[in-house]
Image (cartoon, rainbow, N blue to C red):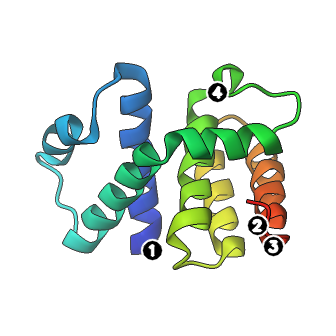
Amino acid sequence: MGQRRRGREYALQLLFQMDLSGGSPEDLFPDFWEGLEVPRSVREFAEKLVSGTRDESDRLDEEIGRAAENWRLDRMATVDRNVLRMAAWEMIFDRETPPAVIIDEAIEIARKFGSEDSGAFINGILDSIKNRMLRGSA
């Protein structure tokens, strides 16, 4: 598994904890990393994803809501919702990685941590966001 995939998986775990506990990244980071031997680059990437996703949560939820026809965010599975937020942040704000790679990574992570339908669900919504970005309306 690549370093960035590991970072995304750790970020998802942190976002999941934040979603359920309401805690801030600053509160969760120290306890989360304690006892884990994680390369600095993986940890920094995970924290960047988490902080960025948290900081832009309103915009991300708006983008996801537009792309997820007939699905409210609060009705989505917690894993799916957080994979979507994290991948959407990376596509819209980070832009270091090509959208197709971000989508593929999100699908794989959703398959690993979500339900059997998570991959297809994530793919459809992120593809819609990507297409809207290409048209310049995201």
Residue type indicated by callout 1: Gly
Identify which amino acid the numbered label 2 is placed on: Met
Quarter where residue 37 is shown: bottom left
At label 4, the amino acid type is: Ala
Residue 77: assigned label: 4
- Identify the secondary structure beneath mark 4: loop
In which quarter of the view is residue 4 placed? bottom left
| Residue appearing at x 40%, y 62% in the figure | 6
Whichever of callouts 3 and 4 sits on the residue coming sooner in the sequence is 4
Q: Position of residue 110 (x, y in %)?
A: 63, 47
Task: Report whether residue 47 is seen.
Answer: yes
Residue type marked 3: Leu
Q: Mark 1 falls on what kind of element? A: loop
Q: CA distance from mark 3 to mark 1?
A: 27 Å
Earlier-in-chain disc, 4 versus 1:
1
Q: Is residue 41 above or below residue 115?
A: below
Q: CA distance from mark 2 to mark 3?
A: 4 Å
10 Å neighbourhood of mark 4: few (<14), some, or many (≥20)? few
Task: Give the residue pinned by disc 3.
Answer: 134
